[in-house]
Amino acid sequence: MRIKVDFDLCKGHANCMGEAPEVFEVDDKGFLNILQEEPAEALRERVELAVKHCPTGAICLEG
Protein backbone atom coordinates (compact mmCIF):
# COMPACT_ATOMS: atom_id res chain seq x y z
CA MET A 1 0.00 0.00 0.00
CA ARG A 2 1.23 3.47 -0.85
CA ILE A 3 -0.15 6.76 0.48
CA LYS A 4 -0.83 9.66 -1.86
CA VAL A 5 -1.73 13.15 -0.62
CA ASP A 6 -3.02 16.11 -2.57
CA PHE A 7 -1.30 18.82 -0.55
CA ASP A 8 -3.39 21.49 -2.30
CA LEU A 9 -6.50 19.97 -0.68
CA CYS A 10 -4.98 19.27 2.75
CA LYS A 11 -5.96 21.89 5.33
CA GLY A 12 -4.14 20.40 8.33
CA HIS A 13 -7.21 19.22 10.24
CA ALA A 14 -5.07 16.34 11.65
CA ASN A 15 -7.85 13.73 11.53
CA CYS A 16 -5.37 11.43 9.80
CA MET A 17 -2.86 11.89 12.62
CA GLY A 18 -5.57 10.97 15.12
CA GLU A 19 -6.24 7.71 13.28
CA ALA A 20 -2.65 6.71 12.42
CA PRO A 21 -0.02 8.80 14.24
CA GLU A 22 2.70 6.35 13.15
CA VAL A 23 2.03 7.35 9.54
CA PHE A 24 0.81 10.97 9.59
CA GLU A 25 2.02 14.03 11.47
CA VAL A 26 0.65 17.56 11.27
CA ASP A 27 3.14 20.14 12.50
CA ASP A 28 2.48 23.31 14.49
CA LYS A 29 1.92 25.28 11.27
CA GLY A 30 -0.71 22.82 10.00
CA PHE A 31 1.47 21.11 7.41
CA LEU A 32 1.06 17.37 6.90
CA ASN A 33 4.15 15.17 6.95
CA ILE A 34 3.96 11.58 5.79
CA LEU A 35 6.12 9.53 8.16
CA GLN A 36 5.66 6.27 6.22
CA GLU A 37 4.79 6.57 2.54
CA GLU A 38 4.50 2.78 2.29
CA PRO A 39 3.30 1.62 5.72
CA ALA A 40 3.21 -2.00 6.77
CA GLU A 41 0.12 -4.01 5.94
CA ALA A 42 -0.59 -4.26 9.68
CA LEU A 43 -1.47 -0.55 9.61
CA ARG A 44 -3.92 -0.82 6.70
CA GLU A 45 -7.09 -0.56 8.81
CA ARG A 46 -5.85 2.58 10.60
CA VAL A 47 -4.67 4.18 7.35
CA GLU A 48 -8.02 3.42 5.70
CA LEU A 49 -9.74 5.18 8.61
CA ALA A 50 -7.45 8.16 8.12
CA VAL A 51 -8.47 8.29 4.45
CA LYS A 52 -12.14 7.94 5.35
CA HIS A 53 -12.05 10.70 7.98
CA CYS A 54 -10.10 13.26 5.94
CA PRO A 55 -12.64 16.10 5.61
CA THR A 56 -11.13 17.39 2.37
CA GLY A 57 -10.50 14.03 0.68
CA ALA A 58 -6.80 14.85 0.33
CA ILE A 59 -5.54 11.33 1.12
CA CYS A 60 -5.84 8.20 -0.98
CA LEU A 61 -4.27 4.76 -1.11
CA GLU A 62 -2.73 2.81 -3.95
CA GLY A 63 -2.49 -0.94 -3.62
Image (cartoon, rainbow, N blue to C red):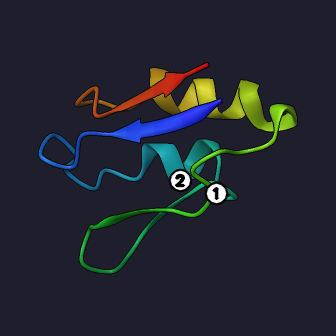
Q: Give the residue drawn at x 22%, y 31%.
A: 56
- In the rendered structure, the answer to whether residue 39 lies left or right of residue 25 reads right
**55 lies above or below 23:** above
x, y percentage for residue 32?
A: 36, 61
Label 1 neighbour load within 10 Å: few <14, some 14-19, many 20+ = some
Q: Amino acid at mark 2?
A: Met
Secondary element at tag 2 = helix
Q: How many marks?
A: 2
**22 lies above or below 10:** below
Task: From the viewer's side, name the closer residue of 48 and 62.
Answer: 62
Label 2 neighbour load within 10 Å: few <14, some 14-19, many 20+ = many
Task: From the viewer's side, name the closer residue of 3 and 16.
Answer: 3
The part of the image, by quadrant, that contains residue 60 is top left
Q: Amino acid at mark 1?
A: Pro
Which residue is label 2 attached to? 17
Give the quadrant of the C terminus. Answer: top right
Secondary element at tag 1 = loop
- In the rendered structure, the answer to whether residue 38 lies left or right of residue 51 reads right
Which residue is label 1 attached to? 21
x, y percentage for residue 42?
A: 87, 34
The part of the image, by quadrant, that contains residue 24 is bottom right
Q: Are marks 2 and 1 in contact (CB under 8 Å)?
A: yes
Q: Give the residue drawn at x 52%, y 22%.
A: 62
The part of the image, by quadrant, that contains residue 4 is top left
x, y percentage for residue 7?
A: 21, 49
Instruction: Work out how far the residue at label 2 is from the one at label 1, CA to CA, in angstroms.
Output: 5 Å
- In the picture as drawn, the residue positioned furthest to the left comes out as 8
**33 lies above or below 9:** below
- In the rendered structure, the answer to whether residue 61 lies left or right of residue 29 reads right
